[in-house]
Amino acid sequence: MGALAESYKDTLLEPQHIPLDYGSVHTLPDSHVWLDESDESPSGVHSTGPPVIDLADPDAARLIIQACETWGVFQLIGHGIPTKLMEDVQSEAEKLFDLPVDQKMKALRSPGGSQSGYGLPPISPFFEKLMWHEGYHIMGSPVEHAKLLWPNDYQGFW
């Protein structure tokens, strides 16, 4: 296991700290309120959205660094990944997150266990508030978790 994975091993949230069931939440829980009225957006961030960076741009490395420092995210184009593959990945991700919560919970990450599985981001314990995030982290082979989620039809996920 890599050093990054090891650094999170003992900081995973307890199982009771699972992602919100976004389909059943009717009011915003205090645990997920991040900004005060006095908070402002980071300087240089505009409402136009995250930067789009062309990997073929000779300045791509600098632009990626700048996007990460400013936004924490960016959209990458010009990467050469076939559109069909991206569509297939998107389709499988939608199937995963469309599952009922009780089904997704079968693949919940456990503290001190595998770094793969359903749950909050591994960095969550470093923040006072919980993130608006539902995620599935894959480190290594996802086959065992896919079998838990789709016992009769898991081959498409991996």
Image: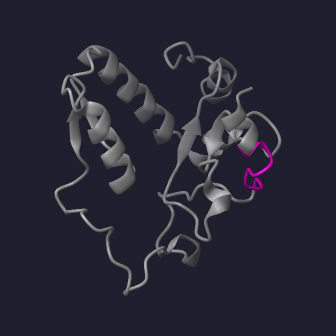
Does the stretch in magenta take in 13? Answer: yes
Q: Residue at x 44, y 32 (%)?
A: 93
Q: Residue at x 18, y 27 (%)?
A: 57
Write down the quadrant of residue 47 in the picture: bottom left
Write down the quadrant of residue 103 in the picture: top right
Look at the picture and state if 9 lies above or below 124: above
Q: Is residue 71 visible?
A: no
- Left or right of 132? Residue 108 is right
**Percent x, y for residue 141?**
64, 18
Depth check: 96 or 33 in front? Answer: 33
Look at the picture and state if 129 lies above or below 4: below
Look at the picture and state if 133 lies above or below 74: below
Does the stretch in magenta take in 114? Answer: no
Look at the picture and state if 16 lies above or below 64: below
- Left or right of 7? Residue 129 is left
Magenta span covers which residues? Answer: 8-15
The dominant secondary structure in magenta is: loop
Q: Residue at x 60, y 29 (%)?
A: 138
- Left or right of 6? Residue 24 is left
Q: Is residue 44 visible?
A: yes
How many numbered discs, if any? 0
* Quadrant where the N terminus is found in the figure: top right
**Percent x, y for residue 61?**
31, 33
